[in-house]
Amino acid sequence: MSHVFLSYSRSDRRLLDQVRDDLRTSGVEVWSDRRLGLGGSWIAEISAAIGDARAVLLLATPAALASRWVMREVEAAQLLGKPIVPLLAEGSRFGDLPAGLAGINGVDLADGYEESMKVVVGAFANVEPASEGEKFPATLPVLLLLTAADTLAKVVTEVARSVGLAVVRPDPSAADVLEIAAGAHVMVIDGRLPVDCGFLAGYVAGKGGRVVCVTEPSGRGSRWTGVRFCGRDVVELEREICVAAFLPVLGRA
């Protein structure tokens, strides 16, 4: 697949429809969540679409820039190295873009819709199509949770379910934990566990999964390879899990 992923706020559907139709008329293949199938995992389909995209067009309206879901799509695209083109609309200015997009050249519809869309079409004509690669799972992604703390488990479970992740919480020493890790999209480890989870962390990270270690600030370090550390702050933990949910997982058996 060689499409452009459209990231937008649901309150801007009219603009989405117009931009999508004009891009298609110009020969640009596009994908938006209006193409989601019924009965499947919407988070898996969106992450797959981002992973397969040649580029991402952000409909950067005030509503989109205020949307945590849109920002998670953008963060996932950045982590995957996808080109991102902001399309400013509804009064947004370049100074309104998040810090992660600072310095990225975009297009402002205030300069005129038709002329702006010509620039957008030209930008995507110069982006190399993504090579045919791994196809991503359409089943509900799994979050492997390793913790002995019920309070932490409750927080992680609530956040994971809100973004379409299925939580599996085995005993770290269980015989089937490696099998679970092989299919894990995300792994969250409690840094205070007495059991050494280094091998499991490396295994999940090596297969393309996202690994997050929840630990006290004083416990940060390079104890495990391929692990992102976050403190026990709920907002930081929520962000790590939600960004991970939007990332496709490569290398699954």
Image (cartoon, helix red, strand yellow):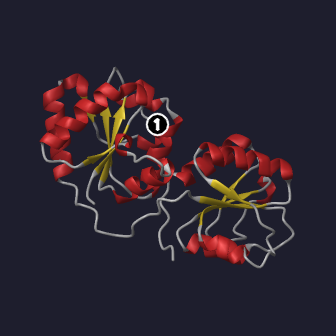
Q: Which image quadrant for residue 26?
A: top left
Q: Is residue 32 visible?
A: yes
User: Residue 245: x, y in percent?
Assistant: 55, 52
Residue at horizontal 22%, vertical 49%? 29
Q: Dot 1 lies on which element? A: loop
Screen quadrant of the N terminus:
bottom left
Camera-nearest residue between 182 and 95: 182
Q: Is residue 225 visible?
A: no
Left or right of residue 140: residue 134: left
Query: Dot 1, crowdedness within 10 Å: few (<14), some or many (≥20)?
Result: few
Residue at horizontal 38%, vertical 54%? 49
Left or right of residue 67: residue 130: left
Residue at horizontal 61%, vertical 52%? 165
How many circles with numbers are drawn on the protein? 1
Residue at horizontal 41%, vertical 40%? 102
Camera-nearest residue between 1 and 74: 1
Q: Using the image, determine if residue 152 lies above or below residue 189.
A: above
User: Residue 35: x, y in percent?
Assistant: 34, 44
The residue singled out by tag 1 in the image is: 98
Left or right of residue 235: residue 15: left
User: Residue 232: x, y in percent?
Assistant: 77, 48
Q: Residue furthest front?
A: 39
Q: Using the image, determine if residue 88 lies above or below residue 121.
A: above
Q: Using the image, determine if residue 227 lies above or below residue 115.
A: below
Q: Residue furthest top?
A: 91
User: Residue 119: x, y in percent?
Assistant: 16, 39
Kind of residue at badge 1: Pro
